[in-house]
Image: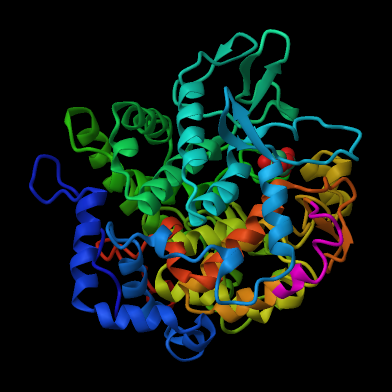
Amino acid sequence: MEGHKEPLRVRVAGSHTNYSLSEMDDFHLTRALEKPRQLKTERKRSFDERSMSELSNGYVRQDSFLDMAHSPGSRSILDTPLSVRNSFEPHPIIAEAWEALRRSMVFFRGQPVGTIAAYDHASEEVLNYDQVFVRDFVPSALAFLMNGEPDIVKNFLLKTLQLQGWEKRVDRFKLGEGVMPASFKVLHDPVRKTDTIIADFGESAIGRVAPVDSGFWWIILLRAYTKSTGDLTLSESPECQKGMRLILSLCLSEGFDTFPTLLCADGCSMVDRRMGVYGYPIEIQALFFMSLRCALSMLKPDEEGREFIERIVKRLHALSFHMRNYFWLDFQQLNDIYRYKTEEYSHTAVNKFNVMPDSIPEWVFDFMPLRGGYFVGNVSPARMDFRWFSLGNCVSILSSLATPDQSMAIMDLLEHRWEELVGEMPLKICYPCIEGHEWRIVTGCDPKNTRWSYHNGGSWPVLLWTLTAACIKTGRPQIARRAIDLIESRIHRDCWPEYYDGKQGRYVGKQARKYQTWSIAGYLVAKMMLEDPSHIGMISLEEDKQMKPVIKRSASWTC
Ligand code: GLC
């Protein structure tokens, strides 16, 4: 694709070609100064106007747009109109959403440190929805950053960093040093007037699941904060550098693996219950990839950091190759798998993971359009999970794990399969659901994950922000607009539920919490990004051209 930003420079230890975030931004600033006129006129025109003509070229014009908006000195935040008072006609529910988001804020010794998962007084069972979840706070954090309120994000990053330093145990088992909590809670003692914190690293969570995604989101958020504020002191502080290194040592450690992807148990991310995503789930692989790239842009190449930088660079190369080749599915690839021979031995094997064509589910043949594709849910020996997962695919676009062609194909598929994937409420967490015998075996008869409910094909409003960001990055904001219209038509009336049920996402979820914070924040973030697309620079990374391009398997394999 033409018009791409300069590749992210790979930093060679000890050399002078290291680019810190600040240097990278200086570089962007130089480019911005070359075209100040263009920027001004671009920013004055409405996004709708741009979307039709220029953004239809996808990556082309947008890069310069993003570069400029996030250069230090260009004050992206200050330039950004607050969503409530911008030139667009604000939707009446925006003010209510902000109010609800602020109501969910959690304070520790007078300082805001996060937002609780749900502010649902009507719900009888609070469980842990009154806690600050790391993954749930991400859209809240982005909303605050986009609104020029970075303090709560900084406090959150520092507070969770402190929690990482705790000694963590599940029964008699000591957890890895780098593990970040799934959630934490502030306890206020009104008599003693003291605040204390309790944290959950999986030892209290239902099913004792490991929050593998927390550390990745933490790194991604640290970059978002740095990118949005231009404040390098936080990410460059010895504490944050150490925090990053500890997370990285967990996921870059050597083991028995034959793949560069990260092996995980079920329930290790947003889908935090048994749902058959154990192995190499796409959501974790995409977040892993994205956080490695974010860490690479923030790690100092000092004595301790240098080794990690080298390991990251190697892993990124292997990971992108593996994902782009083996997780990618489109019409051609599906046809190839359908015709696979099995039991092949040696390096010449075409069917490397010995996938049995009989294991391809019926639905995927009808589902797959001629144009379009996606990263499948999981790939491991003799097992391909063909389910489509939205978060992993959107994060693949944002992190540029997907090549530009693959990103476009993911959006093509979404448009083509709108009824199935979006229906009446954006966005399905995965497609399709599992039912009957398969549901019994895969979920262990989980009554919360019945067909088309919750994690099993339910529709989650929070996913709107990742969808919107992916739409903007691929130059297709009109898709996001359609999704936002759907949400605006009813989410407020339904009191901002956590998820919707049903094949079309028509029903408020069986056990869905109301006033779920990330549903509220996700909506606000989506709105703010559409109004000022430069915001996506915080959570988007351009393609690194040094990564090996995807091998066109169908071409080379058929000969
Ligand atoms: C549920 C979701 C999880 C979320 C948590 C708090 O457990 O599965 O993704 O983080 O609720 O909202």
Report x, y in % for residue 167. 51, 13
- The answer to whether any part of residue 334 appears in the image is yes
Which of these two is toward me, 493 or 93?
Answer: 93
Res 124 quadrant in image: top right
The colour mode here is rainbow
Q: Viewed as shown, does residue 277 lie left or right of 306?
A: right
- The answer to whether any part of residue 272 appears in the image is no
Q: Where the N terminus falls, by quadrant? A: bottom left
Q: Residue at 76% across / 72% down in the picture?
A: 486
Q: Residue at 76% across / 59% down in the picture?
A: 459
**Residue 103 in magenta stretch:** no
- Range of the magenta residues? 485-497
Q: Where the C terminus falls, by quadrant? A: bottom left
Q: Residue at 40% across / 69% down in the picture?
A: 403
Report x, y in % for residue 180. 52, 29
Report x, y in % for residue 343. 53, 55
